[in-house]
Amino acid sequence: MKKSLALLLVLTLMLALVAGCASTGKAGGASDEKVIKIGVFEPVTGENGGGGFQEVLGMRYANTKVPTVDLDGVTYKIELVEVDNKSDKTEAVTAAQSLMSSKVAVVLGSYGSGVSIAAGEIFKENKVPAIGASCTNPQVTLGNDYYFRVCFLDPFQGTVMANFALESGAKNAAVITQLGDDYSSGLGNFFLKAYEEKGGTIVAQEQFQTNQTDFKAILTNVKAANPDFIFAPSSIATAPLLIKQARELGITATIAAGDTWENTSIIDNAGADAEGIVLSTFFDENDTANPVAADFVKGFKEYLKANPDSLSKNGGEGVAAVSALGYDAYMSAVEAIKAAGKADPEAVREALTKVTYNGVTGSVSFDENGDAKKDMAYIKTVKGGKFEFLKTVKVG
């Protein structure tokens, strides 16, 4: 009797398990739902967490617009696998390895060239392609057939800002960079080289340490050199401190940087001292010449309004250039997956070399190094506590 009862219980449990698997689409622990995984390799904490999160927002929004892809008559759900590289090169390697374990078809990111370079070898070794959104240092893609990007590069950006400085009447300039930071030191050097080649004079070069908060010593040296223009590419966290301390010392020169400074938290934290700063960036939400961009801006703002936490972390309804680039990186990945006809990373990498996509930030296609073929930048300033478009600049 006991054996019969035990057998009955076993049969009952087996039937329940089968029924459960049928109702959830699972059998043997595997889902019947067809899924393609795209890795999101970004900082959402650390000194670049603010900009990294804005980049992630662009990718998340893109995923709501194109949540599936059809391959050979089968519909696949696109799942974002997000990891936080914490704005740190060591953490970046761990985060990249985590994505490889998740078996993603392609990786998006990262905000911050240093973490992108640090993780690049991981992607290359595992033969999984990565598409950077705003990592502008040339070393990201150099010698790595598996890294692509949808943004312009620092040699271009440095030249754009050197041209702007000279056209603004700045005959001499100072350069301030972060020691050991690939983005800051790289962009600063490209500005310096272009500025001198075009006839400008560099009167001061200063460096600061990561996580440094007191810049008065180096700014005192800069003030003594009396530059017309200060180029100080740095992180979102560093920028307001540097700006405020420069103004407190009575420095009146134009203070400028690259794309990382397009973040409202810099204005919030620097206050009135942020007035007149200048930066180069990839996109302007008020440029309606591109219908794709206009549709993106409208839809992205609606997406933010529907997600109060995201709206708050974004700093309001403003559309950051990195959000637009994050969107373009995602869409480029989808185009490559469709062109490959499968989610095999090697096939996706090969398809990326031939992808042409009409994106929010312009036409996206890649050269032999995996770099986007971009030739235009936007120059913005801060006026009345807001970013204001000044002009577009082409180099080439």
Image: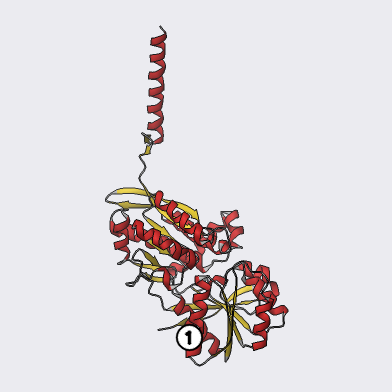
Query: Please, which colouring scheme is shown?
Result: secondary structure
Kindly state the secondary structure of the residue where label 1 is placed: helix
The answer to whether residue 271 is left or right of residue 188 is right
Task: Identify the image quadrant of residue 168.
Answer: bottom right
Query: 203 above or below 35?
Result: below
Residue sitting at 72 percent across and 83 percent down? 250
**Relative image position of residue 347 (x, y in whole percent):** 29, 58
Rendered location of residue 295, percent (x, y)? 46, 65
Q: What is the three-letter code of the residue carrying label 1?
A: Ala
Q: Is residue 75 above or below residue 362?
A: above
Q: Quadrant of the C terminus?
A: bottom left
Residue 365 picture quarter: bottom left
Horizontal side of 170 relative to 376 (left or right) equals: right
* Picture layout, residue 13 above or below residue 261: above
Residue sitting at 53 percent across and 70 percent down?
A: 181
What residue would you read off at disc 1?
194
**Is residue 304 or residue 163 the one in the foreground?**
163
Q: Toward which corner of the image does residue 131 lie, by quadrant?
A: bottom left
